[in-house]
Structure formats: C-alpha cells, structure tokens
Image (spheres, grey):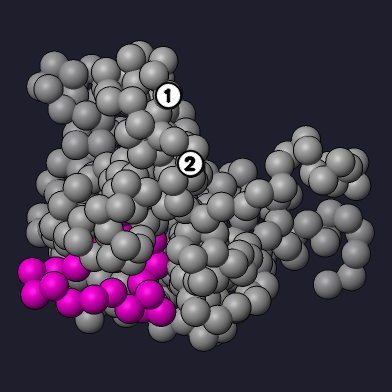
Amino acid sequence: LEDLLENNAAKIGSEVKTMGEPLGHGLTQRAAAEMGLMAGTAVSVSIIDAHAGSLGILGASGASGESADFDNRIALIGGTSTAHMAMSRSARYIGGIWGPYYSAILPDYWLNEGGQSTTGALIDHVIQSHPCYQDLLKQGKDSGKTIYEVLNAILRKMAGEPEDIAFLTKDIHMLPYFHGNRSPRANPTLTGTLTGLKLSRTPEDMALHYLATIQALALGTRHIIETMNQSGYRIDTMMASGGGTKNPVFVQEHSNATGCAMLLPEESEAMLLGSAMMGTVAAGAYDSLPEAMAAMSRIGKTVTPQTNKIKEYYDRKYRVFHEMYHDSMKYRRLMQGENE
C-alpha cells in the first residue's frame, strides 16, 4: 500500500476531517438546483451507514432528559447483517471484536465494533427454505400482513401466553454460523447447525424454525456483549435500530436472551437521523455531536426481559449454544484425522 502515500497521498487525500465538520462552501449552485435546496447549505463530512445509525441512537435520552452513559450502551443496527457498536473514552483491545478505532464516530472516543455476518438474511433463508413458505406468504398478502406477522401469530397461538413463546424451542437449537462468524469467534469458515428436526412440514414447524433462528441470533449478541463486558464495558442496554428491530418477537427475544433492556428510538430511521445530526453541527446549529445527539434523539419504547423463568431458560440455551460450537469443532477435527 506504500504507493497510496506517494506525492503527499494525492490518490486518497492528505487532509483528515472529523464528522460534523463543514466541507467547502456548502452546496454548489448546480447541486442545490438539482436537489431543490439553497446554494451554500452546509455539507458535513460523511460517515458509513452503521456509524450514522449509532449516532442516531446511542445518545437518545428519556423523558427526564438523562444523559447517556456510553459504557452501559451498545448500538444494535440490525438488517441483512448486524453491527454492534460500543464507544469508550479509553482504548479497549478485545479479541474477536474490531477496533478500537479512534474518533471513528465521535471525536475523542474509541469505537469497538462487533457484528454478525448474517441476521435478517439468515431468518429469510430459513423461512424461505421451508415448504410452507409460499402458502404463508400468500396468506399474509391476502390479509395485508407480512410473513413475519403471520409467523408471530402462529407462535402466539402455540404458546397461549406471549411470555411463553421462548419455551417453544426447548428441543430445537441452532448455531447461526451459516456464513461464518464475525464476532467474537472471528472465523469465516464456521458453519451452522440445527438440532431437533422432525418429519414435519407444517406452518407450526416453520414458525418454530423461525423462532429458533431469532433466538440463536440473540444468543450470538449475548456472546458479543459478554466479550465486551469482560474488557471494561458495563453494557446492560441495547439501543436498537434497523429492519429487524421492527419485529416485536425479534426485539423481545433479544432482550430475554441477553438480559439487557432494549430501547427503541422515537425516530426509527436512525441512519438518516445520525446524518442530520452531522448536518446540524456543520451548519452551526449545535456546537458538538454529543450536544446534537442529546437534543435530537429520544427513546420511544423500552422492552425488558420478561421473567426469571425465561432467564433460567436462556441460560440453559446459552450453554447449549456454546456446546454446539465445541461439538462442531470436534467433528471437524475428527474428519481431518486429528486427535481430540
């Protein structure tokens, strides 16, 4: 990569600016005309989407206006894959977790970033692979519901009570490494596992596999949080945004599995809100990004773990989660002809 530094790094630029700093003289005449805005409108230094989403939710305050403690919070940006963002005043080097990156989101803060290679994509893969998928998809369209709403309704009917949904998978367990593991095992060669299969092709069977997938992803998030907490964080709160967090079963089971409160912002489009925050700082409406975060982001809904019985249940499933990984590695060694 030495050639990138030739001629004072002319290929990539040598001037480094931080998020929220204004660029040039704002919108040019041409850009303003094409966008229907005023020439000179402030333009901020840009940021990647998941980082903008973290800006949009990590500083959210409640009704009392309390300030955020970043050591206690992690941003969960859930979509096709999931990013788990935590920030600290000090550099924390954590095995299997990306970073620490200095001033990557907020000036003078260090970012640690965990993640899952596939979350929404895994849920879709599991349900789309089931023989009942097309029938339930049509049922949802005919009733104006998404397939996730149809599956959630099946789970509620099977459980009887909403707080009993988690227990439906006591004999079904998944290791969700269908596309490797990004954090904290950091191994792209890992593969997924599903136990508890039966000769069943019913909608109820599909709903159970869907639930087992959500629970496995939630346990993967627990693994990331516990790894971060072993290195100085005190995370007990997830600030959530993204497509997956619009699914109430996804949200509740993540809270149950991790033991963390799950806070959903009033503004669901956290990436857009984070980008707007940078724009307001660039325009001088706020003096700093933390000030903009506190002023522009509010907690809309709080979801907490349901019962001690569910906690004990997830503690057992978490043990199974780790045992499945160790078993899979044992099988790999056996097939490679290695001694255990």
Q: Tell me where residue 339 sits by quadrant.
A: bottom right
134 sits left or right of 268 in the view = right
In contact (CB < 8 Å): disc 1 and disc 2: no
Residue 188 lies, in percent from the top left, at 70, 50
The segment highlighted magenta reads: 56-75
- Between 128 and 205, the one lying in front of the other is 128
Residue 29 lies, in percent from the top left, at 39, 19
Q: Is there any visible trace of residue 9 in the rendered image? A: yes
- Between 86 and 14, the one lying in front of the other is 14
Q: To which residue does mark 2 refer?
A: 23
Residue at 15 percent across and 41 percent down: it is 153
Residue 25 lies, in percent from the top left, at 44, 36
- Between 286 and 209, the one lying in front of the other is 286
Q: Tell me where residue 235 sits by quadrant.
A: bottom left
Magenta run includes residue 271: no
Q: To which residue does mark 1 refer?
A: 28
